[in-house]
Amino acid sequence: MAVSMSKTSAAALARRAARIRLVGLDVDGVLTDGRLYFGARGETFKAFDVRDGLGIQFLRAAGIGVAIVTGRNSPIVAARARDLGIAHVLQGQRDKHASLQRLLADTDLTAAECAFMGDDWPDLAVLGAVGLATTVADAPEEVRQRVHWVAPSPGGRGAVRDLATLLLRAQGRFDAMLDAALQPGPFVAAPGADGTVAAPARRRSPGRGAVRG
């Protein structure tokens, strides 16, 4: 079971974050603010934060995989995942813990190498089974008490970007990415042969692997 954030020291948090190779994300309440918008014909809409999208691209640029694990099914989520290059999109997963365990087995990763960000009670089981359990600022107290780290920002409003910053700092990649962003020209990333993005780079013109929100 994940310990209370108040019992996770800064040093212990940094050690956990330094080991992470895969980040699992819930959607509603994490990548969105949790609200569902319905059109006149019953169609559903979701809103995503561009800062969270950029944070996901930064994770990929650092070689950290990203997975979506959600209990709902939505073509909007699939489209957003394609836009951000997220390879692992697990929708309709009522048992998120079991889904993540299968993904870890498929990717040959351990639970200690996985972080997860959830926002409510359906995420508690999976949060208790990963190396770095995280949640959003507006999560219920019962969730915030059972994770290693709580993002400063609420769900759908930069919490995933906060998590990306935490991981990049712990793994010594933050300063290099910031330095690249300070240089003239578009900020891009170079995809590796396996489809992941290995490192930030600069080009004179936009191309494949451009980091976008």
Image (cartoon, rainbow, N blue to C red):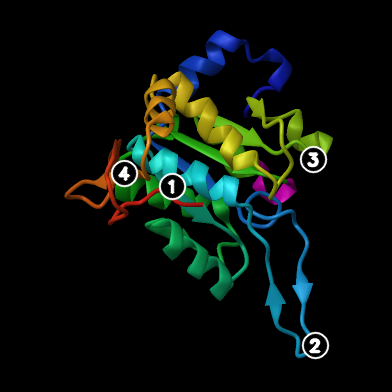
Residues rendered magenta in the picture: 120-124
Mark positioned earlier in the residue sequence (4 or 3) = 3
Residue neighbourhood size for the residue with mark 2, other residues' Cα within 10 Å, grouped as few (<14), some (14–19), many (≥20): few
Q: Which secondary structure, mark 1?
A: strand
Q: Which residue is mark 2?
A: 40
Dot 2 or dot 4: first in sequence order is 2
**Would you place residue 33 above or below residue 158 in this image?**
below
The disc, 2 or 3, on the residue closer to the chain's N-terminal end is 2
Q: Contact (CB < 8 A) between labels 4 and 1? A: no
Magenta stretch, main secondary structure class:
helix
- The residue sitting at 58% across, 43% down in the picture is 126
User: For the residues marked 2 and 1, what is the alpha-carbon distance in whole angstroms?
Assistant: 34 Å
Q: What residue sits right under mark 1 in the picture?
A: 66
> Which one is nearer the viewer's eye here, 6 or 181?
181
Residue position marked by numbered label 3 in the rendering: 138
Residue 11's x, y, as percent?
54, 9
Is residue 31 a member of the stretch shown in magenta? no
Q: Amino acid at mark 2?
A: Ala
Taking the spot 62% from the left edge, 10% from the top edge, the residue there is 9
Is label 4 in a helix, a strand or a loop? strand
Tell me, for residue 84, which label it has, or none.
none
Residue at 28% from the left image edge and 56% from the top image edge: 208
Tag in front: 4 or 3: 4
